[in-house]
Amino acid sequence: MKATLIIKNIHKLYASSPGSDVFSCIEHAFVAVHHARIIDLGTHDHRQWIDKDTRIIDASNEIVVPSFIDAHVRFCFDRRSGDNVRINQETMELFYKNGITTVGTRQLPAVASSPYYQLFLCERQRLPIVDYGYLRHRQLKKGFLLSTSFLYEEQPFYDLMPLASLLCMEGAAGAQEILAAMTLRPARALKLSGKRGIRKGADADMIVFQARDLEELFCSFGRQRLHRIIHQGVHIYPHVII
């Protein structure tokens, strides 16, 4: 078995371990993917995974983190059927272009299946959600999950990065905890073991950012650093590469 995709020369790779919210920062690393799964990562020689069909991405001077997960999205169901479908489809298109490729919701919308994102039912549980309401009360819950708490018209937020940047710049939480609140914790809340970070056997859902480290990423408010998105082993942004 050879890799279908390899990301090499990663300046800093934020890998994870099962059952932990702590990331291991691996410098000058690679990630090898076979279709939708990660098959290897680290600093050793990646050439063993390459054949003529392997697509290679060079991430020099960039960081790689897990794709974002929002476990508290509320879709539109109160309009005409056609309007609901259009609005919900547009919602997910904006989400994945901002790095949110996995969404949890209490009611699944009628949208066409897509290679760009995945939707899952979220059990009716009280999640420690921190959303843009943080701007009013400035309080974090223990083990918090970052969410847009998207609701069409009432809370039309499609991006987690401004909220993450705000928390980091205010010193409300450390960069690794903020990343965990956007990735590992919501994956656990949704019971998605395959999406608990970048590790062998996990889903190949990753974001490549043009930054030196997490701190620079989260302290660059308003600057677009997102360079690439890999979802289920496919390069989906800024353009699809199969």
Image: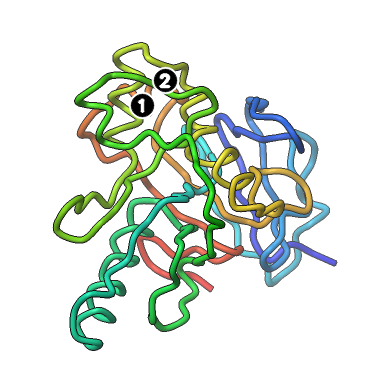
Between 9 and 130, the one nearer to me in the picture: 130
Between 168 and 2, the one nearer to me in the picture: 168
The answer to whether 67 is drawn above or below residue 93 in the figure is above
Q: Amino acid at mark 2?
A: Glu
Q: How is the image coloured?
A: rainbow
Q: Residue at x 53, y 39 (%)?
A: 64
Q: Are marks 2 and 1 in contact (CB under 8 Å)?
A: yes
In which quarter of the view is residue 3 placed? bottom right
Q: Which residue is mark 1?
A: 218
- Counting from the top left corner in percent of width and height, residue 216 is at 37, 22
Q: Residue at x 60, y 32 (%)?
A: 14
In which quarter of the view is residue 5 placed? bottom right
> Does residue 80 appear to the left or right of 174 in the view shown?
left
Characterize the local packing of mark 1: few (<14), some (14-19) or many (20 or more) Cα atoms within 10 angstroms. many
On the rendered image, what quadrant is the N terminus found in?
Answer: bottom right
- Counting from the top left corner in percent of width and height, residue 175 is at 46, 21
- Counting from the top left corner in percent of width and height, residue 23 is at 64, 27
Quick one: SS at disc 2?
A: helix
On the rendered image, what quadrant is the C terminus found in?
Answer: bottom right
Tag of residue 215: 2
Characterize the local packing of mark 2: few (<14), some (14-19) or many (20 or more) Cα atoms within 10 angstroms. some
The answer to whether 210 is drawn above or below residue 196 in the figure is above
Quick one: SS at disc 1?
A: helix
Q: Residue at x 75, y 60 (%)?
A: 50
Between 66 and 137, the one nearer to me in the picture: 137
